[in-house]
Amino acid sequence: MHPKRKKRLTLILFLMAGLSIAIGLTTYALRQNISLFYDPSQIASGEAPGDVRIRAGGMVEEGSVQRDPDSLRVTFRVTDFESSVTMEYTGILPDLFAEGQGVVATGRLNGDRLFVADQVLAKHDENYMPPEVMDSLEKAAARAESNTAQSIPEY
């Protein structure tokens, strides 16, 4: 092989190897920062992974908010009207956080299947619903509707 061609081939191989390493490291870094959304029904059925950063959301159940008087710890239940999951958050909740309102929380499921949130987001006006929560509630309503239709006998 001609020395000039050998030099070009070596340069191309090093560039390809460097590009492959850069793509691999970028993919690895992005995979570590992904947080997938799960609704309360998926969490209750065990579809959500434990001890992995995920997002969960739904409607805050009426009467479920319990505040610790000695700290900023708050425990509440989030539902999609089919299942519900208990969430725990330590910190200052958003001003718009309230029972019966939609929330999306980012955190991890611990060994007891308690969702420990490190961030809680509440809707910002009365007409807005986070897209993930809206989709989750629509799916739950469709499942409930199909279960009702199957359980009604036809004569």
Image (cartoon, rainbow, N blue to C red):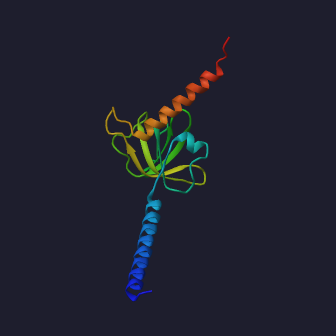
The answer to which quarter of the image holds residue 5 is: bottom left
What residue do we see at 56% from left, 42% from top?
A: 42
Residue 61 seen anywhere in this rendered image of the structure: no
Q: Nearer the viewer, residue 82 or 131?
A: 131
- In this orientation, which residue lies closer to the viewer: 120 or 52? 52
View extreme (front): residue: 2
The C terminus is located in which quarter?
top right
- In this view, 8 is above or below 21: below
Task: Please count the marks in the image.
Answer: 0
**Quadrant of res 95:** top left
Which of the pair 4/68 is nearer the observer? 4
Report x, y in % for residue 101: 41, 35
Up/down of 69 relative to 135, above or below: below
In this view, 10 is above or below 53: below
Image quarter hosting the N terminus: bottom left
Residue 70 percent across, percent down from the top left = 44, 51
> Which residue: 41% across, 47% down?
120
For the point 46% across and 68% down, the residue is 24
For this view, does 41 lie left or right of residue 102? right
Outermost residue to the bottom: 3
x 47%, y 65%: residue: 28
Instruction: Specify the farthest residue to the left.
Output: 125
Q: Is residue 10 visible?
A: yes
